[in-house]
Amino acid sequence: MPEPELFFEDFVPGDVIELGTYEMTEAEIIDFGRRFDPQYFHTDPQAAVNSPFGGLIASGWHTVSAWARLWIDTVVSRADGRGSGGMQEVRWFEPVRPGDSLTATVEILNTRPSSRHADRGTVFIGCKMTNQHGRVVMTFHGRGLFGRRHPLSESAGVSPDPSAAGSAISSKGAVEVRSADGVDLNLRMIGGSGPDLLVCHATGFHGLAYRPLAQSLKEHFTVWTLDFRGHGSSGPAPGDDYAWSGMGADVAACAAAIGGGRLYGFGHSMGGAALLMAERSQPGTFERLFLYEPIVLPRGFFDQPGNNPLSAGARNRREVFNSRAEALERYSSRSPLAVMRADALAAYVEGGFVDLPDGRVRLACSAETEARTFEASGGLPTEETSAIDVPATVAAGTVVAGVSNPGIFGPAIAEALPQGRFLSFESLSHFGPLEAPGVVAAATVRELLDG
């Protein structure tokens, strides 16, 4: 195997690489069709005349394979390639016929070094093939893993720098991540197998509260949860400023810390908005998103201070209890938390309090922090989501719980997103992921992996 010439650092966003041409022959089309896609218009020239295509055409997967051969011959064979994280949005626009000459190109869309494996990084690519007439026959998006040029100096026994944004330090299953503005965040790996999935919580909650949801997702994903600034085990926001742009920065830092290949996102309420803001700032961060009633509102909806009715209620919350058991008993019989499934409510109480010296417990997310976070909502206007081009399912319940009903904005958000779709849950409220985690998890798997 020859020494590689190309490394992760050589791929620059915006660069377009010409991969050469591929000549499609009738014999090759028939052979590929018989072996892998035995439909008559790929295998029988005479019968294909009466097909909707009027003649023999290549399988779409044959066209993808032809592109891949040129990509490997031109780039990967010269590079420190480490495999691929997958492909998405494959589209075939024109039939490919015998004698067609296909020209392949690749555009470097984005690059992301892995924080988990300092010897590699992910390159996001836009792939295209055109025929001899200049017409586009196929496009898709992909991602490849490539080794870094100097892996030893970056990973040989050197501990991450805690002062650097996105650095991570493992400790008892949790990871401490430094956000771009210096906030220490708690990122927890729940476990599982499969591609990484980052779960982002609602205002006033924390990652551990979604443990029942994560348990239902672990068969399909490696599940991570984060605590946003001022919530759970994460540190406070600088100057107690809980502008939601900071929540987006928290997501971006945790996504970089997870690193690796495909990354999916699940966001509830504020968490959904934060996922969209992170994807807007760094396109290509997420493969797909599932957003349950994300707080994405029309511009100006909460422009006036104090207009969010939830902030007043947050400031009236009781912060100190004699024990977690006392808090659990109180919450289980009072709105709105009483709608949560028992194990989700127990997980919320488990991670939602800190121990005081006198044996009592106090809310980890203070009443004032929760109120300020509500007052800062609306960080991403609906009108700006049209620039976020990521496959996203926007879900909402049909039951109104409390003084607000963010689910009514779901259809408009889905329509505004270029690749958005809307999903409705009958009999669930804004607390859906916490009141029926199994139901929401099943839909999440379908939408993210089969959508």
Image: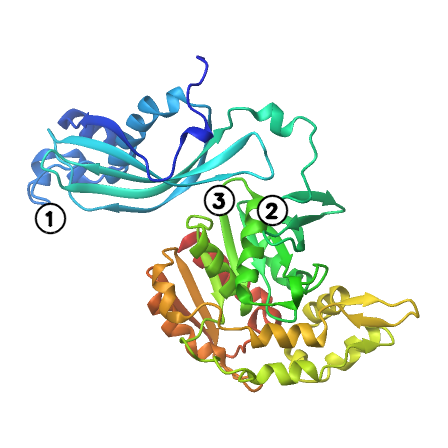
Location of residue 373 with respect to 188 vertically, above or below: below
**Left or right: residue 183 compared with residue 4:** right
Q: Which is nearer the N-term, disc 1 or disc 3?
A: 1
Q: Between 177 and 37, which is closer to the camera in this rendering?
A: 177
Residue occupying image coordinates x 19% and y 36%: 58
From the image, tell me which residue sits under label 1: 52
Where residue 3 sits in the image (x, y, percent)?
A: 46, 14
Which one is in front in this view, the residue at disc 1 or the one at disc 2? 2
Which one is in front in this view, the residue at disc 1 or the one at disc 3? 3
Which one is in front in this view, the residue at disc 3 or the one at disc 2? 2
Kind of element beneath mark 2: loop
Residue occupying image coordinates x 55% and y 56%: 249
Instruction: Tell me whether the residue at label 1 lies in contact with that at label 3, contact meaning CB atoms closer than 8 angstroms.
Output: no
Hey, which quadrant is residue 365 in on the image? Answer: bottom right
Q: Which is nearer the N-term, disc 3 or disc 2?
A: 2
Task: Give the number of the disc on residue 165.
Answer: 2
